[in-house]
Amino acid sequence: MNIDQKILDGLNYCKELDVLKYFKSDSLFINNDKMLVDGQDKVRVHVTTEGKSCEELNERWTIQDHIDKIGNICKAGSCMELGWICDNIRYYALYGGDKYNFYPYHNFEKYVDEYNK
């Protein structure tokens, strides 16, 4: 699966379950404008990764559950790749489809180099 397809699959998953809005939460852990993909348990969501209502099930689900599911759907090869995919989803959520500027794959090496700075 190419990287463009991974991001598209992640976006489609978020749109289908209506969780895209949670990717623009002020409660997300962001470091140097990069979204962390571990420990994102503060942002509660309304739906499970199977699309069921958390309220009806009386269960607590967070954006972390969806981040993990996106990693599985996209077959992310590393936490950095998953972070890059989630950053693209976050940017799409923040700026919308018209203003979204895809962080291109040819900059992935630069992204990885700067990830922990």
Image (spheres, rainbow, N blue to C red):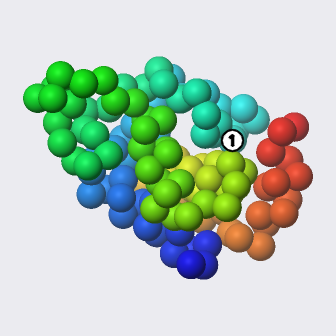
Q: Which residue is most to the bottom?
A: 2
Q: Quadrant of the C terminus?
A: top right
Residue 40 in percent (x, y) is at: 53, 29
The answer to whether residue 74 is seen in the rendering is yes
Please name whichever residue, 63 or 99, is drawn nearer the observer in this view of the structure.
Answer: 63
Q: Which residue is most to the left?
A: 56
Decide: is 89 above or below 116. below
Q: Residue at x 75, y 35 (%)?
A: 32
Assign a secondary structure to mark 1.
Answer: strand
Please name whichever residue, 44 or 91, is drawn nearer the observer in this view of the structure.
Answer: 44
Q: Residue at x 67, y 61 (%)?
A: 77
Decide: is 58 above or below 31. above
Q: Residue at x 48, y 35 (%)?
A: 64
Q: Residue at x 17, y 36 (%)?
A: 53
Residue 59 in percent (x, y) is at: 24, 24
Quadrant position of residue 1: bottom right
Residue 42 in percent (x, y) is at: 47, 21
Query: Is residue 59 left or right of 89 when viewed as pictured?
Result: left
The answer to whether residue 84 is seen in the rendering is no
Query: Number of labelled discs?
Result: 1
Q: Residues within 10 Å of mark 1 (few under 14, many from 20)?
A: some
Quadrant position of residue 47: top left
Residue 38 in percent (x, y) is at: 61, 34
Decide: is 91 above or below 30. below
Amino acid type, callout 1 = Lys
Residue with the mark numbered 1: 34
